[in-house]
Image (tube, helix red, strand yellow):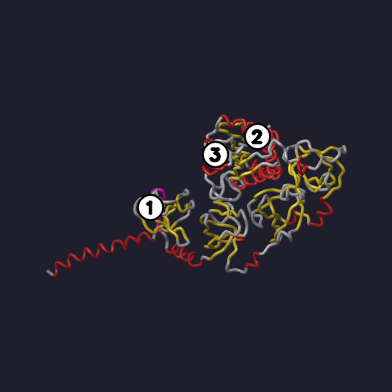
Amino acid sequence: MIKKQHIWLIPIMMLMLVPAIQVKAESSQSVHSTTVLNIREGPSLEDPIIGKTESGTSYKVLADNGDWVEIDIGNGQAGWVAAYLVTKSETSSSEDDNSQTDSITATKGTISENGVRMRKGPGTNYQVITTLSINMPVTILSNEGNWTKIHSESGTGWVNSQYVVDENQDTAEATEVSSADSQTAIVAEDDINVRDTASLNGEVIGKLAKGTVIHIVGENGDWAKIQFSGNTGWVYQNLLESGSEVEKGSKKSIDTSITILHDGTNIRSEASVHASVLSIAGEGDSYKATEEVGDWYKIELTDGQVGYVASWIVTESAEKQPAAASTQDSGEKGDLKGKTIVIDPGHGGKDSGTIGAVGTLEKTLTIRTANLLAEKLQAAGSKVVFTRQNDVFITLQDRVNMSSFYKADAFISIHYDSIKDSNVRGMTSYYYSSSQKELANVLHESIIEATQMKDRGVRKNDYFVLRENTQPATLLELGYLSNQQEEGLVSSQKYQETVSAAIYEGLENYFQ
């Protein structure tokens, strides 16, 4: 009897050991995918999405139920991915050790600038995942050269180390020039590159024309950190003239008059698109110009003020003309005063929209255009409602809801286009219902006339923000970021000012 009991105990003990053996075997495996996959809270499609995998990145397997695999996503977190979408492989002991080291050495930090690109790998040749905001808290996982791997609320990826402030380091090292102490300089050469890092290996994020007045807010060796397109960037200092040279060489006294080409032209307090708007000028308004400051004219207003207007949106006449009446109140035009305009900058937050040939994020560019348009409309007495003003994700339904709630007189969704064929260029306007067609036609005509973009026509399309919108609405694709030449054009200060003025003028025509 005793022997039989011992015989039955042996298979029971072996069964008890199976789970332990299974867990150990699975912990030595990793999975990866060539595409971005949803990471869910549990092993089913009904469980909420808590993140996304990075293409080509390996993840340690924690458990496997056949249809779903639980993976380690870092920072002490785990999630589930569909087993049939990933490839399993054995993880070497050295990889396990590295994973543990990252977990042990992880420290807290913050992002030091707005619009910092987070990439899938440690270099500018890796795809941009999203952009991060200033002061965003992150967990620093590891470093490789000039790049830091971080985990944030937007996911895990790599950013340039100069934009990550480690809380364990002396914060004084991260101090830069304050706005009050910033230096003024002028671009000495035409078409110079603005880069995302202080290095010739940095990604080109824009270009500056000769004579552009800029503000230097930081330095790193031979590089100057400047305010650029609502963000910051780096240029080689030898391509800039100092503040004293700006005073001596960049200004030229003149005695002429200029005429405004477009309604909604901004008159600014300084020779920069980042300066505050003093007033809004209309097509045909004339001013006495007393100075050329780079690509800007210094003009006189009859109320004693002086302002600056960009040279690319005016014509010059050799004959003296009397100064136009102050445009301080010219924005109070009957056509737009009291109108409710909902401006919808496309994409945002986790949805970057298209990414340009040299890295321009659509979601960032749409905000720039929206802000310039809003300045003009507000000066004209319009009530402006943004669907988003920051880098946040807003659902399509919420965007449409705002249009209905505020009873928009016009809903304008701003976008930039992309296509596999990098030779395609131009701008397209869209509508859905017949009641929206007139708005699309009028704005399209105004934009094409002002920008001289390739005309791709006005088309019907069932975009959600148009199809579900009960108010007059249009969606504008203002150029192709997939075309490198056009990406540079639409990202320029000149185009942004011109196209926003054209939309403003189109709205005037629509409400006449």
* SS for dot 3: helix
Instruction: Answer with mark 1 or mark 2, whichever residue precedes in sequence.
Output: 1
Can residue 177 be spotted in the picture?
Answer: yes
- Nearest the viewer among 115 and 510 is 510
Q: Are marks 1 and 2 in contact (CB under 8 Å)?
A: no
**Residue type (three-letter) at the residue carrying disc 3:** Val
Residue 85 image point, x, y percent: 41, 48
- The numbered mark at residue 465 is 3
- Splitting the image into 4 quarters, where does residue 416 fall? top right
Q: Is residue 198 magenta?
A: no
**Residue type (three-letter) at the residue carrying disc 1:** Pro
Give the answer, above or below, for where 134 lies relative to 318.
below
Q: Nearer the viewer, mark 1 or mark 2?
A: 2
Q: Please give the range of residues in magenta.
A: 84-90
Give the answer, above or below, for where 343 lies relative to 135.
above
| Residue beneath disc 1 | 43
> Residue at position x 59%, y 36% from top?
474
Q: Kindly report the distance in space between the C-alpha atoms of the residues bearing marks 2 and 3.
A: 17 Å
Task: Left or right? Give the position of 455 relative to 37.
Answer: right
Residue 243 image point, x, y percent: 79, 57
Q: Is residue 85 magenta?
A: yes
Task: Left or right? Give the position of 245 relative to 46.
Answer: right
Instruction: Answer with mark 2 or mark 3, whichever residue precedes in sequence.
Output: 2
Can residue 359 be spotted in the picture?
Answer: no
Residue 49 image point, x, y percent: 45, 51
| Residue beneath disc 2 | 443
Q: Kindly report the distance in space between the C-alpha atoms of the residues bearing marks 1 and 3.
A: 33 Å
